Image (spheres, helix red, strand yellow):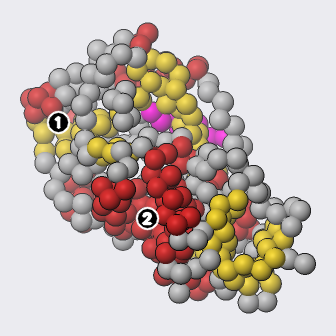
Amino acid sequence: MAEECDAVVIGAGVVGLAAARALARAGREVLVLERHDVIGAETSSRNSEVIHAGIYYPSGSAKAALCVRGKALLYAHCAAYNVPHRRLGKLIVATRESELVSLRAYQRQARVNKVGELPWLTRTEVLAREPQVDAIAGVYSESTGIIDSHAFMQSLLGDLEAAGGVVALRTEVNELARLGAGLRVGCGDFDLDAKAVVNAGGLHAPALAARLGARRRGYFAKGHYYTLSGRSPFTHLVYPVAGADGLGVHVTLDMAGQARFGPDVVWQTDADYGFDDSNLPRFVAAIRRYYPGLDESMLHPGYTGIRPKLVPAGEPAADFLIEGPADHGTPGLVNLLGIESPGLTASLAIGERVVELLG
């Protein structure tokens, strides 16, 4: 006999926890199933820990709307729950004349996305803010920040449990099937019959969705991060103009003030988190475009993360795919697919959306 339950969330990453918390606070009985022995073991703990402003995303996209809404919710949440964070601001810099048009485009897109103004910075103004950065111009994003992602996830877990929700670790979902007006969730040794299921499986969410007929394939894009020894020469986040594959090798700071550079983009067919140090020459070349004073000996391998992509290499970046019953025809199911950056920033807004979709 299968155990009956109200709402199951698959995946205890930041998005799964945010969705589970939102459902529990809305009065649902929530069980979160996580295959690892800790929460947030994959994408949620292997990223830049940036609170994004919402600049880059196409007009009307889910990424744009949920990032801007999520950013407001996230800053308020951090203040209310004492989650370590800092509103540092970010410089996006051009190092060649051909990139100036991109800076102007960022200014326009920020207005459209309701991010606010991105003041233009001359070379002298860039140097005044970041003396080690060599650029011909830049724009400044005041609302960009950093966050302790682990402390944030712990705050979500605490709220979830306070509302009666439960997280079951070391519990892998290997089957998902429609069952009358509900869904059967198979976990190997036992089955659950749920009224509602949220597929927040991250890298593995498309494969789970395929169990119910979704024709979506996931792709894995690994990113390497290098850390910089010693005191950081930067006080803001510093980003180059974005390339075709992503936002480029940029500077972020952690809550302790240590600088790190990343990520690059390495496409692969599995969730291999191994660090390939042969990438170092490419990193050095990319960093020296805007930080020519880099001492290569101060760079050290940090960690890797993998972004859950919905399109393969060479294709334009896909939007978040958030599918409710009206989209796929399966009552009680919400699929959260391709939740890459800015998923951390957008997580609380995604939680709101899940509650709306499940009615």
Classify residue 282 as left or right of residue 75: right
Q: Is residue 266 magenta?
A: yes
- Please provide the residue range marked out in magenta: 262-268
Q: Is residue 319 above or below residue 4?
A: above
Residue 327 percent across, percent down from the top left? 59, 82
Mark 1 element type = strand
Split into 4 quadrants, where in the image is the N terminus?
Answer: bottom right
Mark 2 element type = helix
Residue 227 percent across, percent down from the top left? 44, 24
Q: What residue sits 72% from the left and 43% below the top?
A: 270
* Viewer-proximal residue among 82 and 87: 82
* Viewer-proximal residue among 56 and 158: 158
Residue tagged 2? 348
Say few, some or many: other residues with alpha carbon within 10 Å of mark 2 (under 14 / 14 to 19 / 20 or more): many
Q: Is residue 223 above or below residue 51?
A: above
Residue type highlighted by circle 2: Leu
Residue tagged 1? 137
Residue type highlighted by circle 1: Ala
Residue 32 percent across, percent down from the top left? 65, 64
